[in-house]
């Protein structure tokens, strides 16, 4: 019986997940330095180019800007913020001069996070993850998912 208990404890310890639920404590800072830099989408439609630039903000968070160009015209632009506010980390997304839509961070690891807002029409979930040399952003609702695959550029 002691052997079984020992093996069971080892099994549970080995199954520990590196992902963490976003804690509400101020001590639960998220390190998303893997987001930093200039990124260009590599799975975009022909004739269209999409970019994201991420930097650290001065208030212990991250700021990003995303935009899409067709020919020499900017056809879409959004402001992104990954920040802790009121003891909760959120990804805030807004178009220029609009009120940000918050997506609560519900899960994160060393190279990914999941954010959700069930009240938003689309998307309800935004996930960012580092996959080798790529940055993958996935926006989704149940039954619909769009991947934005980026490569780092200078």
Image (spheres, grey):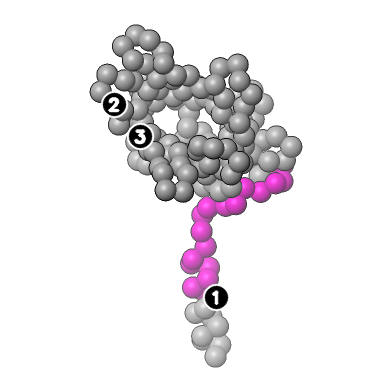
Left or right: where 110 falls relative to 27: left
* Mark 2, secondary structure of its residue: loop
Foreground: disc 1 or disc 2 = 2
Disc assigned to residue 149: 3
Q: Give the residue pinned by disc 1.
A: 9
Specify which label sits upstream in the sequence, 3 or 1: 1
Disc assigned to residue 45: 2
Residue 116 in the image, given as x and y percentages of width and height: 56, 43
Q: Is residue 5 above or below residue 150?
A: below
Q: Residue furthest bottom?
A: 1
Front-most of 48 and 6?
48
Front-most of 40 and 111?
40
Residue 73 in the image, given as x and y percentages of width and height: 38, 10
The image quadrant that residue 5 belongs to is: bottom right
Label 2: few (<14), some (14–19) or many (≥20) C-alpha neighbours in 10 Å: few
Region rendered in magenta = 9-27
Asked whether the residues under the numbered discs 2 and 3 touch, taking CB atoms below 8 Å apart as contact, a structural biologist would say: no
Disc assigned to residue 144: none
Magenta segment main secondary structure: loop
């Amino acid at each position: 019986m002691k052997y079984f208990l020992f093996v069971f404890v080892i099994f549970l310890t080995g199954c520990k997940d590196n992902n963490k639920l976003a804690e509400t404590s101020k001590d639960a800072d998220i390190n998303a330095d893997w987001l930093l830099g200039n990124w260009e989408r590599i799975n975009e439609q022909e004739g269209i180019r999409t970019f994201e630039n991420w930097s650290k903000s001065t208030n212990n968070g991250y700021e990003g800007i995303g935009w899409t160009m067709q020919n020499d015209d900017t056809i879409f632009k959004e402001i992104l913020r990954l920040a802790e506010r009121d003891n909760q980390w959120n990804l805030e997304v807004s178009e220029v001069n609009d009120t940000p839509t918050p997506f609560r961070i519900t899960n994160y690891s060393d190279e990914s996070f999941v954010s959700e807002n069930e009240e938003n029409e689309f998307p309800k979930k935004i996930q960012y993850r580092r996959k080798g040399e790529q940055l993958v952003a996935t926006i989704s609702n149940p039954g619909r998912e769009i991947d934005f695959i980026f490569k780092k550029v200078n």
